[in-house]
Amino acid sequence: MSAEANAGKALTVDLEGASFSRIPIKTRVVMPGDDLDSFVREYASEVVQPGDTLFVTEKIVAITQGRSFPVDSIKPRRLAFFLSKFVVKTPYGIGLGMPETMEMALRECGTLRILFAASVSAVTKLFGRKGDFYRIAGDKARAIDGPTSGTIPPYNKAVVLGPEKPREVAQRLKALLGGVPEVAVVDINDIGGNILGSTLTKDGDKQLVTILRDNPLGQGHQSTPLGIVRKTTASA
């Protein structure tokens, strides 16, 4: 299966005296009911090489785990309507800024935790501090993706939760591919990123976030939910 870079994204980056290729893998659209192992085997098995790191978007892991929900199937409670009004909207995604995504955060994280996160965030924002809501609410809240016009259908009308047991997923996919690549389940966007689970060391996770910080997979209609990081040469 051929791999190609997304438009506007550099094919290579230099870091710590080395050069790394970032190779997005174009695929069909992942659908609920798809088997993740079969999907990864189909598109990645002939591309990965020893020493590679295969990175998998958290969204396709979650979709294959049945964690994607049509917006019109979610019935937000009054609290979700209220809390969503205070979420800052950004050009990079709706986050919890709509009642349906906030409702799913309340279900995923628990009402008390979300209320505590919102209360602390409301206070610390008065002192110019940002980010406390997600620091307290945790990765489950941060990983919730809401619908946007730039998202590939049918997920432009869906809420996708974060994946379950991403570290175990990464370990399973590494074994599936014969132990050839390291594997990471990633949540990368245009304002930052996180490694949700991987077969890398902690230092390896940090390095991977830096390598992928400009979001080489994109977030729209690219249909590249898999990618490879490959160390190529020492940079001059």
Image (spheres, grey):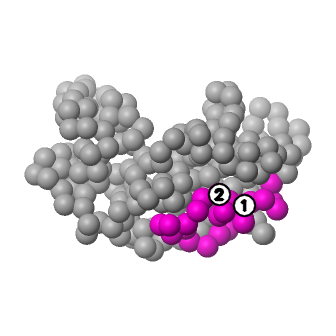
Based on the picture, tell me whether residue 31 belongs to the magenta stretch: yes
At 18% from the left edge and 50% from the top edge, which residue is drawn?
80
Judged from the image, the secondary structure of the residue bearing numbered disc 1 is helix
* Residue, disc 1: 41
Q: Which label belongs to residue 80?
A: none
> Number of labelled discs?
2
Span colored in magenta: 25-48
Badge 1 amino acid: Arg
* Residue, disc 2: 37
Figure quadrant of residue 222? bottom right
At 35% from the left edge and 63% from the top edge, which residue is drawn?
69
Badge 2 amino acid: Asp
Q: Quadrant of the N terminus?
A: bottom right
Q: Is residue 174 above or below residue 123?
A: below
Q: Nearer the viewer, residue 18 or 43?
A: 43
Q: Position of residue 198 (x, y in %)?
A: 63, 38
Contact (CB < 8 A) between labels 1 and 2?
yes
Q: Position of residue 47 (x, y in %)?
A: 81, 60
Q: Quadrant of the C terminus?
A: top right
Q: Does 76 sit left or right of 208 as displayed?
A: left
Q: Position of residue 221 (x, y in %)?
A: 54, 71
Q: Is residue 12 above or below residue 6?
A: above
The answer to whether residue 190 of the structure is visible from this angle is no
Q: Is residue 118 above or below residue 183?
A: above
Based on the picture, tell me whether residue 11 belongs to the magenta stretch: no
Figure quadrant of residue 224? bottom right
